[in-house]
Image (cartoon, rainbow, N blue to C red):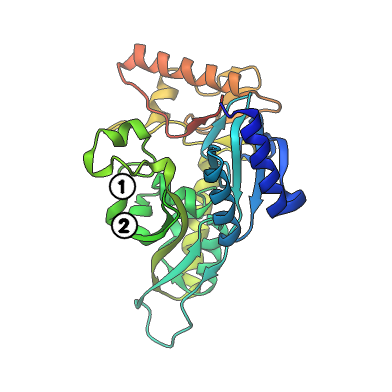
Amino acid sequence: MVESLSLDAFLGDLTAAFGDKVRRSEPLAGHTTPRIGGPADVWLAVGTLAELIRAVGLARQHQVPIFMLGGGANVLIHDNGIRGLVLENRAGRVEFPPPSERKPGETVSLTAESGVVIPSLVRRCARRGLSGLEWAVGVPGTLGGAVVNNAGAYGSDMRQSLVRAELLAPTGARVWQPVTWFAYEYRGSRLKRTPEATSRQPDEAVESGVDWIVLQAEIALTRAPAADVQARLAGFNERRKASQPPGASMGSMFKNPPGDYAGRLIEAAGLKGYRLGQAQISPIHANFFQNLGGATAAEMLALINMVQETVRQTFGIELELEIEIIGD
């Protein structure tokens, strides 16, 4: 809980720096893919890394909690919202490698700021004949979120694409870390771990993931004929449209357990298409949950709990959330 006097002092300094871009009690449903979420105490969208660093510095100075919001695709925000500062990251500058006359197959890299929207970045790469990120064309959200969560699809993930990333450290320093530093695992990294989890690991005791903020990332690519890259994109898009629901949805909701698929287990338990209020398990893909219009976080959470309990009783398998539940 943020003390009101501390929050007011912070709000004054933040408004002095950013003017009317700062909003109080901003509803977050309009800033997330499932269109669910209560208000933020303070909300601010930043468009550059300089703005991002400035806002984080002020929040840390006033000891106000920070939540970084990218595309809002992998979070379920409680109906009571989020206390402290919600920073919506829109810093999206990209440095592409210069054009080259070399033959396809040349290894290159690009550097992109953490707020760039991933599907847009993938399409821009394809037009330039840069291959390696085609798998991510259907991954919603921003590059920063993908780095933190080790986003993946179609057998690839950020662990295979990332070269290094620049982070804003708890001290305020800007530090580049190689891909090995992130200790990637299936849909997770050291940046996704809680302070409690990292405190159990001596080498990471002062490096809680919530204290580090992704600023930009270097991505490995190879040159290829643009037509070939765009054809692969088209193929992945067709697969996504055939297997994933459109509209206000979130997924994958659960991680795939070893040797199986969460969607298969949910469907086999007879829950595909099940509805609770305005929240529904997609009739297209059982590991995607949909907001049919006006769904609350409470309804979505009740649906999540029901699925976990049913799969546990039916198959003896504990489904682990892939999305994060945030807020009060």
Task: Identify the amino acid type marked 1.
Answer: Tyr
* Residue 184 numbered mark, or none: 1
Quarter of the image containing the N terminus? top right
In the displayed structure, 234 sits above or below 146; it is below
Residue 29: image location, x then y, percent = 67, 34
Which residue in the rendered view is the most extreme toward the top?
313
Task: Identify the amino acid type marked 2.
Answer: Val
Q: Which residue is mark 2?
A: 179
In front here: 318 or 162? 162
In front here: 277 or 45? 45
* Residue drawn at x 30%, y 16% as measured from the top left: 316
| C-beta proximity under 8 Å, tags 1 and 2 | yes
Residue 300: image location, x then y, percent = 57, 23
Horizontal side of residue 12 vs 132, given as left or right: right
Horizontal side of residue 88 vs 217, given as left or right: right
Q: Secondary structure at mark 2?
A: helix
Which residue in the rendered view is the most extreme toward the bottom?
101
Crowding at mark 2 (Cα within 10 Å: few <14, some 14-19, many 20+): some
State which quadrant residue 37 falls in.
top right
Q: Secondary structure at mark 1?
A: loop
